[in-house]
Image: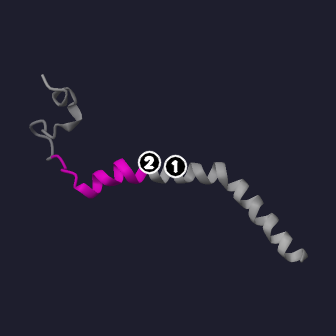
């Protein structure tokens, strides 16, 4: 038995009487697989690195004003 057969989420069969299954497009799959993790990592990067960037920009601004 192949490993793909063990992964039930790949099946797009519907139960009789239920509405048809939506077949996702390549854009939908790309948004789920790439877009959402990239968006989450961007938010985490801003939370973690943002204060240091803000402090660095503030210190660079005060050095220019003093000169």
Q: Residues within 10 Å of mark 2 (few under 14, many from 20)?
A: few
**Frontmost residue, 43 versus 3:** 3
Question: Which residue occupies 44% across, 48% down?
Answer: 37
Q: Cβ–Cβ below 8 Å for labels 2 and 1?
A: yes
6 vs 32, left or right, is left
1 vs 25, left or right, is left
Q: Quadrant of residue 3?
A: top left
Residue 31, percent from left and from top: 35, 54
Magenta residue span: 21-36
Circle 2 — which element?
helix
Q: How far is the residue under mark 2 from the one under mark 1?
A: 6 Å
Q: Which residue is mark 1?
A: 41
| Residue situated furthest top in the rendering | 1
**Frontmost residue, 26 versus 67:** 67
Circle 1 — which element?
helix
Main SS class of the magenta portion in the image: helix
Question: Which residue occupies 77% across, 59% down?
Answer: 55
Residue 49, percent from left and from top: 66, 52
Question: Which residue occupies 81% across, 64% down?
Answer: 59
Depicted 62 relative to depicted 36: above or below = below
Q: Is residue 9 within the magenta segment?
A: no
Q: Which residue is mark 2?
A: 37
Q: Quadrant of residue 65?
A: bottom right
**Frontmost residue, 53 versus 17:** 53
* Quadrant where the image shows the N terminus: top left
| Residue situated furthest right in the rendering | 66
Question: Which residue occupies 70% across, 59% down?
Answer: 53
Residue 46, percent from left and from top: 61, 54
| Residue situated furthest left in the rendering | 16
Q: How many marks?
A: 2
């Amino acid at each position: 038995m192949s490993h793909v057969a063990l992964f039930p989420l790949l099946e797009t069969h519907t139960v009789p009487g239920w509405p048809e299954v939506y077949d996702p497009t390549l854009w939908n799959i790309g948004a789920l697989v790439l877009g959402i993790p990239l968006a989450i990592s961007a938010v985490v990067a801003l939370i973690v690195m943002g204060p240091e960037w803000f402090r660095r920009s503030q210190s660079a601004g005060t050095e220019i004003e003093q000169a």
